[in-house]
Image (spheres, coloured by chain):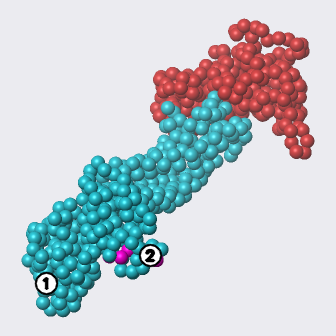
Chain colours: A red, B cyan
Amino acid sequence: MVLLREKEQKVTLTMNEQPVMVFKDVIKVYPLPSGDVTALDDISFQVERGEFISVMGPSGSGKSTLLNLMGCLDTPTSGDIYISGTRTGDMSDMDLTNLRRDRIGFIFQYFNLFPLLNIIENVTFPMMLKSQKTVDPEKGKEVLRSVQLDDSLFTHTPTEISGGQQQRVSIARALINDPDILLCDEPTGNLDSKTGAGIMDLMSELNRKGTTIIMVTHDSHIAEYSQRTIRIADGRIVQ
Amino acid sequence: MIFWEIAKRNIRLHMLRSTLAMLGIVIGVVAIASMGILGNSLVATVSESLSSVGDSVTVSPYSGGGGGFGSGGGGTSTSVNLKLSDQNFQEIKRAVAPNVAIPVVSTSERMKVGVGTDDIVATIYGVDPQYIPDLKLVLTAGGYNNGNSGCLVGFTFAKDHNIKVGSRISIGSDGEKGTLRVTGIIEERGMSFDLSTDNAIVATQDWFDNTYNRNDYDQIIVKVKEGQDTADVKTLIEKTLNKRDKIVSVMDSKATLASIYSTFSMVTTFVTAIGGISMVVAGVSIFNIMMMSVSERIKEIGIMRSIGTQKKEVMSMFIYEAAIIGLIGSIVGGVLSIVAGYLISALMLGSTKYLITMANALSVGEGICFGILVCLACGIYPAWQAANLNPIDALRHE
């Protein structure tokens, strides 16, 4: 991670050279009846392609708000966010949704697979959103194999497999559309330490192969898998 | 499409709940369509009874306003015994030519069929035999009466009193008005604007005049030839006889038929609307179930939105769910409404011969379409609400 000291720096680099994500003077304020709450206060940083970053901080520090902004699920009160060179501030809900679908992969603490779909359907779901038609399940199987999930589980439903296996499916789903960034929210928070370590090994492997990963965690052991750590306190980057 | 598949699977997952919602739609469609079928069958039944007399214009003495028309001529009279004179008949005959004007006399009389039977009271019509073919009285047995002592009897009258061709009927309390021999039995005619023969006797006019000492008429029936309008004939008669004072009432059977059809149509609409209330109840049930479905799946919606599902795609998923419930419920309801229509027609009208008609097919089609539309309409708001959930709040939902 590189903190931006020159706030006026412009993002004009080509697709391969430009940072995957840029936060520039981002402020997020939640208006509440009891008074405005500033969740993020003048945050600036950028993420280069191929980095593995962890975001740490105590409860209420602004980690979730930062994750929501990085995932284009929320918009800043002021400041600019660029994803792969595209400024998100002026984008419509439809464009932001397409951006999430095409450029960002989400990995959640509680896996968040669709219980009505089997493993292959869960993994290929984002592909179907993108192509608007039935997709070839072969790519889904290929990605599932790359996250070391056994072929015999492909037609099972999420409730029929273990937590670790569900998280591998969740990672496969996040990877299926070849995103620029993987956003992970406590990816091992609901797993035992051994399974969690397996998941982190997998994510390290993905990063070695070039996948950019940003991981929110409160676990310093897990954060050790990343190359850099952003520490947040009271809505500001402290390190 | 994946959202159609998810909608199907969610319905299967909550089979009992979905089935109950479908049941509501089934009941709604059955109520609407079967009421429509009943109304259509009712109209068809009445039409069959009346359409054969849709070519008549009936002229009777004007009884309104306290005035009347005597038997002696064209002037007004205060007599309460309202009759039409021969002069009136001749005027009408000339006015409506080449259409046929038929003078008819009638009375209600005691009579006895066979020995030792009770007295019966029935209507006796007196009609000149030359006009019988014009009245289109079709016989099921026997032939038209040529002699003065012969008569035709109506189908129901003959059936109820076991009268056959050749039977004799004593007219009057003690047969003092003579005896009529049955020469023929008239086919059932149902409701009629001219002669209601089903429970009556049709004697010759000569016999009637001699027996009751009559030289006037109770009504004159004008049979309008094909290609001419009954309304024009009615106007013609009114212009001829009601020049200065209103002395006759003229009834146009076609206009009356139209009025009856209109009334039945309103009744059909009314009973169908009552059936529609059950559809509204079913709609509320669908709305409730869809709202439950949305509230149960808030987190799922959040996940979908976060990984790139558009609002319209989330909306489509819930619309599909409502559409599947509506489609299955409505089609099952449509099929059952045919069964219900059959049973209702059989029980209430005593006949199911009008079940397979275009009007009934339309009623079933309307019921099915209405069922599907109600489901879609009731699914729109929950679907819209699901699509517009804040993804962050939805993801946090437990």
- In this view of the protein, can residue B192 be seen by the observer? no
Against A67, residue B107 (above or below) is below
Give how far across and how far down residue B298 sits, in percent: 65, 43
Against B248, residue A94 (above or below) is above
Residue at (86% x, 16% y) in the render: A4
Give how far across and how far down residue B52 sits, in percent: 27, 59
Q: Earlier in the sequence, mark 1 or mark 2?
A: 2
On the rendered structure, is B370 left or right of A228? left
Mark 1 secondary-structure assignment: strand
Q: Numbered disc 2: what chain?
A: B
* Residue range highlighted in magenta: B66-71
On the rendered structure, is B289 left or right of B195? right
Residue at (47% x, 23% y) in the render: A136
Q: Within the image, what quadrant is residue B176 found in?
A: bottom left
Give how far across and how far down residue B10 sits, in percent: 52, 44
Q: Which residue is mark 1?
A: B179
